[in-house]
Image: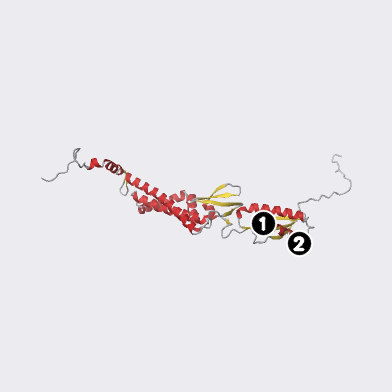
Amino acid sequence: MGAESSCGPTSPRPCASRRLPFVELARELLGTQLIETETVHLTLGHVVLSGLIIAVTFVLSHLVRRGTRRAFEIRGVADEGTIGVTTRLIHYVVLLIGFSIALEAAGVHLSALFAAGAIFAVGLGFAMQTITENFVSGLILLVERSIRPGDVLELGDDIVKVRRMYIRSTVVETLDDLDVIVPNSDLVQGRVRNLTYLDKIYRVTTTVGVHYQSDMDQVRVVLEHAGAQCAGRLRDKPPIALLLEFGDNSVVWEVSVWTDDPWRQRRLRSALNEQIWVSLKEARITIAYPQVDVHIKSGGFSPPPDPSA
């Protein structure tokens, strides 16, 4: 008589239903259908698996960016702009791959999704034209690297420093310590002067007017000496004093010095103005200012005739 498998409370080998009750319950729960169509069969298990893949993607992105920063440090790369742009591009690439795998795990075929979304993307592009434009501009900035975190820019009449770059906008800081969010399309399509693009050498200028009776050779020597004594200037580039024009009330001179930190140009210009003031005073050279000459003619004043007379 063959051995028969028994399943009961007195059996030494309990049945599978008693041995793994939670596993069976989990299988039934994860197999619950959420969406079922001809092309998509989405269960709760697919959603959980996709969520796990997305979580792992963010963790993996963090680890890869951390390793990239460590590799840059080992190689001696200290440019924060290069490191920031590289790590952000890696972050977006890892997220793109992770979300693609998560969609495939959820039963969404990307080929069909792209084909169906092509028409939708066109309509969405018209509806969200500005956002799409900023998004594409952000990708251009990250790939082209014409603007990087830490760069000093001239936007219109403002001098700003790039603090953070995102896919849609860029955060900059003004000289008044204000944080401004600039759309990326403004940086790509507008005219922007990057003061630190190839190098950080920047010329700081100021003007001063002297009296017409001053000795211009002496003025040039004094102004060049004042520029040389200015604290904070770049020492390997000598200052230059140029006669700009003959104004209505003074002879206008321009004094130029150089710095390797454009972000501190306002302080350097202030120091240069103070040194020019002291040097001209010590040389007894008059700093001209607008004057008005009033000429009074001698003779009596005759009132106009009375029309009623």
> Secondary structure under badge 1?
strand
Mark 1 crowd level (few <14, some 14–19, many ≥20, 10 Å Cα): some
Q: Which three-letter amino acid code belongs to the residue tagged 1? A: Thr
Colouring scheme applied when the structure was drawn: secondary structure
Give the position of the C terminus as an image quadrant: top right
Residue in the picture at 74% in, 60% down: 221
- Residue 301 location in percent, x, y? 87, 45
Q: Is residue 216 left or right of residue 270?
A: right
Residue in the picture at 23% in, 43% down: 16
Q: Nearer the viewer, residue 17 or 185?
A: 17
The residue at which mark 1 appears reads as: 205
Q: Nearer the viewer, residue 56 or 173?
A: 56
Marks 2/1: CA–CA distance: 20 Å
Residue in the picture at 68% in, 53% down: 271
Q: Which three-letter amino acid code belongs to the residue tagged 2? A: Asp
- Residue 159 location in percent, x, y? 60, 52
> Secondary structure under badge 2?
helix
The residue at which mark 2 appears reads as: 217
